[in-house]
Amino acid sequence: MRKQILFLLLSAWTQCSLAQGTDTLRLSLSKCREMAIEYNQQLKMADNAVVQAKLDREIAFANYLPKIDGQTMVGWAKDTESMGMTIMMKGFYMADIMLQQPLYAGGRIKAGNDLAKIGQQVSEEQLRLKQQEALLETDQAY
């Protein structure tokens, strides 16, 4: 009985001290808007889409540039003897470089660049739309 009373008094005292120690969190509208922009997952995905569109545009522009390809080969062999003849081969080297420049692709390169530019503009507008939606929802909730 004595332990139960002591336990009740101790738990009441703990709850009172915890209740007094908590402060209420006050948020202004501007702070709520900042937090909404910072923590919104849809905005992060839209921002990633903008970055991806910029990279796609750079890739499309790279089609104007020449493509360079190369390879090298080195071989080494011991002296061999076949059919009574001695073949002396100390080694061989080979290098190959290839350069490709598109001269005419039927407008494919220009159309690809135009589409990449439009894709980047669309993704930037979608990001702005998502930001405005997040701010509107925050303002309505506030």
Image: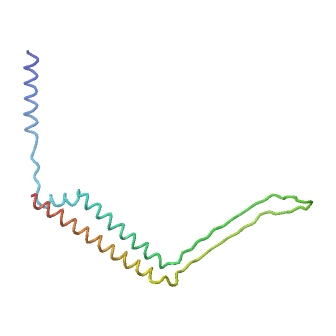
Q: Nearer the viewer, residue 31 or 104?
A: 104
**Residue lying farthest to the front in this orientation:** 106
Q: Where does residue 109 sit, x and y in percent of width and height?
A: 45, 79
Residue sitting at x 33%, y 73%: 119
Left or right of 28, for residue 83: right
Q: Where does residue 36 sit, x and y in percent of width and height?
A: 19, 58
**Rendered image quadrant of residue 99:** bottom right
Q: Can you say which quadrant of the picture contains the N terminus?
A: top left
Q: Where does residue 5 sit, x and y in percent of width and height?
A: 7, 20
- Residue 108 sits above or below residue 89 on the image: below
- Residue 93 sits above or below residue 6 on the image: below
Q: Nearer the viewer, residue 64 or 105?
A: 105
**Residue lying farthest to the right in this orientation:** 84
**Rendered image quadrant of residue 83:** bottom right
Residue sitting at x 36%, y 71%: 54
Residue sitting at x 23%, y 58%: 40
- Residue 117 sits above or below residue 83 on the image: below
Residue sitting at x 18%, y 60%: 34
Q: Nearer the viewer, residue 82 or 90?
A: 82
Q: Where does residue 50 sit, x and y in percent of width and height?
A: 32, 68
Left or right of 73, for residue 12: left
